[in-house]
Amino acid sequence: MTNERAGVLQGTLDLMILRTLAAMGAQHGYAIAARIEQVTGGAVQLNMGTLYPGLVRLEAKGWVKAEWRTTETSRKARFYQLTKSGVKQLAVEKAEWLRTAGIMARILEDPS
């Protein structure tokens, strides 16, 4: 993977957060950001000013729920986890992203 950072494409933050929580279970914001950075080989580095509004938005939609817990370093943090509605939304978001990526692949492969 390249060392270049990628911007967060419009509409992909929700999908990245939902997928991360599905894979890892309940996590605090810093752990979510660190996991996304790890999975993308450093190409996506979310700052907290991007991540936390996304988490608040997902919580308002009922796709994640949050509760205060203690981290492994004995700090208080809000831990986020998927709700049943969030699991369903993840499937919807994933299917739409794969459809869109397929369309773009066809356009980019057009020989004319």
Image (spheres, rainbow, N blue to C red):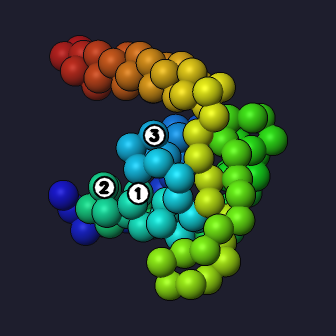
Disc 1/disc 2 C-alpha distance (Å): 5 Å
**Nearest to the observer: residue 63 or residue 3:** 63
x and y percentages locating residue 92 in the rendered image: 54, 19
Q: Amino acid at mark 1?
A: Ile
Q: Quadrant of residue 58?
A: top right
Q: Is residue 13 visible?
A: no
Disc 2/disc 3 C-alpha distance (Å): 14 Å
x and y percentages locating residue 77 in the rendered image: 65, 72
Q: Residue at x 29, y 16 (%)?
A: 106
Closer to the eye: label 2 or 3: 3
- Mark positioned earlier in the residue sequence (3 or 1): 3
- Mark positioned earlier in the residue sequence (2 or 3): 3
Task: Give the vertical position of 34 relative to 65 (above or below).
Answer: below
Disc 3/disc 1 C-alpha distance (Å): 12 Å
Q: Quadrant of residue 94?
A: top left
Q: Amino acid at mark 2?
A: Val
Q: Which quadrant, please, contains the C terminus?
A: top left
- Disc assigned to residue 45: none
Label pair 2/3, CB-CB below 8 angstroms: no
Q: Residue at x 39, y 60 (%)?
A: 35
Q: Secondary structure at mark 3?
A: helix
Q: Amino acid at mark 3?
A: Ala
> Label 1 neighbourhood size at 10 Å, few (<14), some (14-19), many (20+)?
some
Question: What residue is shown with label 1?
Answer: 36
Closer to the eye: label 3 or 1: 3
Label pair 1/2, CB-CB below 8 angstroms: yes
**Nearest to the observer: residue 52 or residue 26:** 26
Question: What residue is shown with label 2?
Answer: 39
Q: Secondary structure at mark 1?
A: helix
- Disc assigned to residue 22: 3
